[in-house]
Image (cartoon, rainbow, N blue to C red):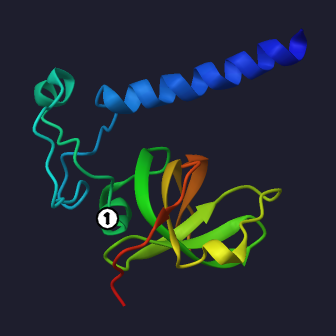
Amino acid sequence: MQYIIKSMLKHISTILIVVAVCAGGYTFAQHENIIGSSDSKSEVVSDDFAHNHIRPDAPNSVKGVKKVAKEGDYVLLRGVFVRRADAGVYEFHDDAGDGLFIDLGKSFVLNERFFNTSEFFIWGQVRENDKSTTIEAISMSAKSFPVTSRVP
């Protein structure tokens, strides 16, 4: 019984995070370079996005996160894992080729066959230290998408 309750709470918290993002949970999304442009625009835009003046067409850019995001901010990134940097920490690059580190947790090991070959969406929280900006992953897309074009 306790396992079922824990499992339900885990799924409910994930749903709440997704709802928060859809409702315009980005506090810093209107800053320069945070939400990039996309070739495919959505014809139908939710009233929540229009009301908050947020464009729902793209995830955050690494460059924008490094420039504007503060420790504790939540970000959504799309890109590829490039290499393993440390136990549970991986270098991650977006479509522009800009990179930062994603902390997936020490117990998580990403198979090397995904490096530079599959795109992932990462939902996480900004953690800064004196050397670099790191994103502590809360969740990542369950499905990987084949990379069609990459900036060298």
Q: How many labels does the image show?
A: 1
- Residue 66: image x %, image y %? 38, 65
Above or below, comparing residue 18 to residue 70 in the picture: above
Nearer to us in this view, 66 or 51? 51
Residue designated by label 1? 67
- Residue at coordinates 70% horizontally, 77% vertically from top-left? 112
- Residue 6: image x %, image y %? 79, 19
Above or below, comparing residue 10 to residue 100 in the picture: above
Answer with left or right where residue 73 lies relative to residue 111.
left
**Does any portion of residue 105 appear in the rendered image?**
yes
Answer with left or right where residue 4 lies relative to residue 9.
right
* SS at mark 1 in the image: helix
Which quadrant does the N terminus fall into? top right
Answer with left or right where residue 23 lies relative to residue 18.
left
Residue type (three-letter) at the residue carrying disc 1: Lys
Instruction: Give the quadrant of residue 28.
Output: top left
- Residue 152: image x %, image y %? 37, 91
**Does any portion of residue 132 appear in the rendered image?**
no
Instruction: Give the quadrant of residue 22.
Output: top left
- Residue at coordinates 52% horizontally, 48% vertically from top-left? 124
